[in-house]
Image: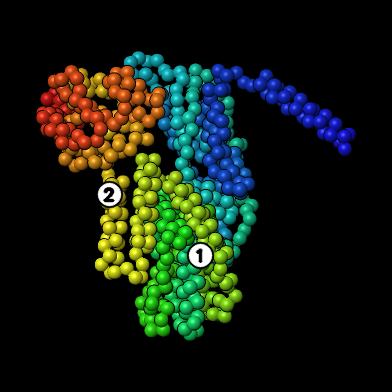
Amino acid sequence: MLMQKKIAAKLWIVCVFVFTCCALGAQTNAPNSTTTTDFVTLPLELVRHEKEFSNVHVEPARMGSKLGLAVIFEGTDDLHYYAKPKTAPAPGFELKIQAKSEDFEFGEAVFPKWSIFKEPLGKKVEVYVGKFTIFVPTKAVRAPANTTIIDVGEVEVRISGIACTSIVCLPPFEKALKVSIDWSQRNSWKKISLVSIGQTGKPITVIGYSAWFALGLAFVAGLALNIMPCVWPILPLIVMRLVKQAEQSKSKSIAMGFAFCLGILLFFACIAGANIVLQSFYNTTLSWGDHLRNPTIVTALALLMVVMALFMFGIFTVTVPSSISSKSGSGEGYLGSVGMGFLAAILSTPCSFGILTVAFVWVQVQPLALGTFAIMVIGLGMALPYAILTSMPGLLKRLPRAGRWMELFKQTLGFILLIIAVKLIKAVPDDNKINVLYFAVVLSFCVWMWAGWVGYGTKPSRKLLVRIIAVALVIFAFRFFFAPQLINWQEYNADLIRSAKAEQRPVLIEFTAGWCTNCEFVDRMIYQRRDIAKLIEQKGVLAIKADTTEKNLPATLALKNIYNEPAVPVSMLFMPDKKEPIKWRGILFANELKRSLESLRAQRSRRDGLRHNLKRDQ
């Protein structure tokens, strides 16, 4: 054993020595920094999926007698880009290269010969794959003041498109990289040939698979949606619903179960319909996850996760409607089942991003009919377990009996749902993250009021009063925390303030801090007043929001050293005809601020001033 350790130690030392020598050798043989370091960008990873990847870097090059940029792609053999708009999954998804610079002019990108890719349904498309180079011709722009040619200039190269493997397509991308070009070294740029570096047009050997295989994967993805944590909050309701149905009759159980499945399919039919409309009338595609890029939808889903977590904690309960629990139930029960199925499908979306993203990207590159059918197959996969359970009520007897373990399990799921809510809130814009958290607390309190402050024995009048107060609180909190910004605030900038004062323009500075509760009250109750915001706009006031959250911020230093104020909140209005500003400390100064603003003479906005000057010059 000791001998093995000694041998291992010696081998480790040898490896370190060899690695060090290689590194030193690489440094010694590195090209001169004046001719290479400024030119070649480090490889930028454009896309990656499991073992498949594609990188790109840019360097100046010569192609024949032309000078320009060589955009060099390197990647695996089963990842390709589309060469033509007509055969790309959608218009605009073909590989595109754009170069921009203030110092150089660029011509149209020159692409190499493409390869032929055979899609699963037999369609042949032109693609670029593996290692290939695209050439962008360029020339230097002469300086406007003289005839001197720019030597060194900055260039931004923007690359966009969509990348696919033989199995899946990845989301569309657009990435940019920057490179410096030293025009004085153009004679030393290396020569390239797109034929030798690019593709030769030979067909690509890919892993073939049938549409049936892809539809099978879509069906499995739909089955997997039933085990997503986001769906678990309504699983107890579903089980209760199924049990009640089984107690009535087999035919009733089957009918209610299929109504539930219909709700699931209705959700996926809506998604398929949206995809048809976008592709047929707007030449665009539906990317799964686009709804999670909408701040309003993300906020709503995050709050829904919080409410569902409260349900798991037992703060409130949802009873099965009497139309289902009694044998006299009618069509209303069927409608409730459809709604419950639709809700189950909606709730699966935040947790199913990874599964459904792959499925929906694949759908975008298929014929419209096949893509629509694939979306519905996902819904069939999700609905199948419920169809089986309702068709065979005897299976319900095999479900685990309720007990203490189920309560603990539900509460555990509540914490998981809170984690999902936090993850969703991370996608909310920074300006609204804190507001969402505040509103979530108020919403939770109101849900507790709604369910916990009343009971079955509570008088109807008292029950109605409590619930009206709860709803009113939610509405007030929503308007309080999500009110639109009425004032065009600027960040604290001493030069901007100094310039405004020199132009005899009034300046309003609100000193605030993220940890200051009173500051937030001032924001909401004073600066969110429409009359005050309108006066600030009419009088041409420069509004500055000075953040003093951290001690080293410019506004913090100015508050202490320039304005001699010890604390926040404090607001200051600099009048054009006065040396000292009017200051308001605390939170109750709305009327005083309004009177001061009304005393200002109306100021032209900057845009109006420019128009006036232009008209005068003409």
Q: Are marks 1 and 2 in contact (CB under 8 Å)?
A: no
The residue at the point 30 percent across, 38 percent down is 520
Q: Is residue 370 visible?
A: no
- Residue 64: x and y in percent read 54, 29
**Closer to the camera: disc 1 or disc 2?**
2
**Along the line of sight, which residue is nearer the eye, 20 or 451?**
451
Say which residue label 1 marks: 378
Give the vertical position of 547 relative to 337 (above or below). above
Disc 1 crowd rating (10 Å Cα; few below 14, some 14-19, many 20+) is many
Q: Is residue 289 visible?
A: yes
Q: Image quadrant for the C terminus?
A: top left
The residue at the point 36 percent across, 70 percent down is 456
The residue at the point 79 percent across, 27 percent down is 13
Give the vertical position of 447 relative to 22 (above or below). below
The residue at the point 64 percent across, 21 percent down is 30
Give the vertical position of 408 relative to 60 (above or below). below
**Along the line of sight, which residue is nearer the eye, 450 or 265?**
450
- Residue 571: x and y in percent read 24, 29
**Along the line of sight, which residue is nearer the eye, 559 or 608?**
559
Element class at badge 2: helix
Query: Mark on residue 508?
Result: none
Element class at badge 1: helix
Q: Image quadrant for the N terminus?
A: top right
- Residue 513: x and y in percent read 34, 32
The three-letter amino acid code for the residue at tag 1 is Ile
571 relative to 378 in the view: left or right: left
Q: Quadrant of residue 300?
A: bottom left
Say which residue label 2 marks: 479
Q: Quadrant of residue 131?
A: top right
The three-letter amino acid code for the residue at tag 2 is Arg
Among the two numbered marks 1 and 2 on one chain, the one whose residue lies closer to the N terminus: 1
- Residue 500: x and y in percent read 22, 23
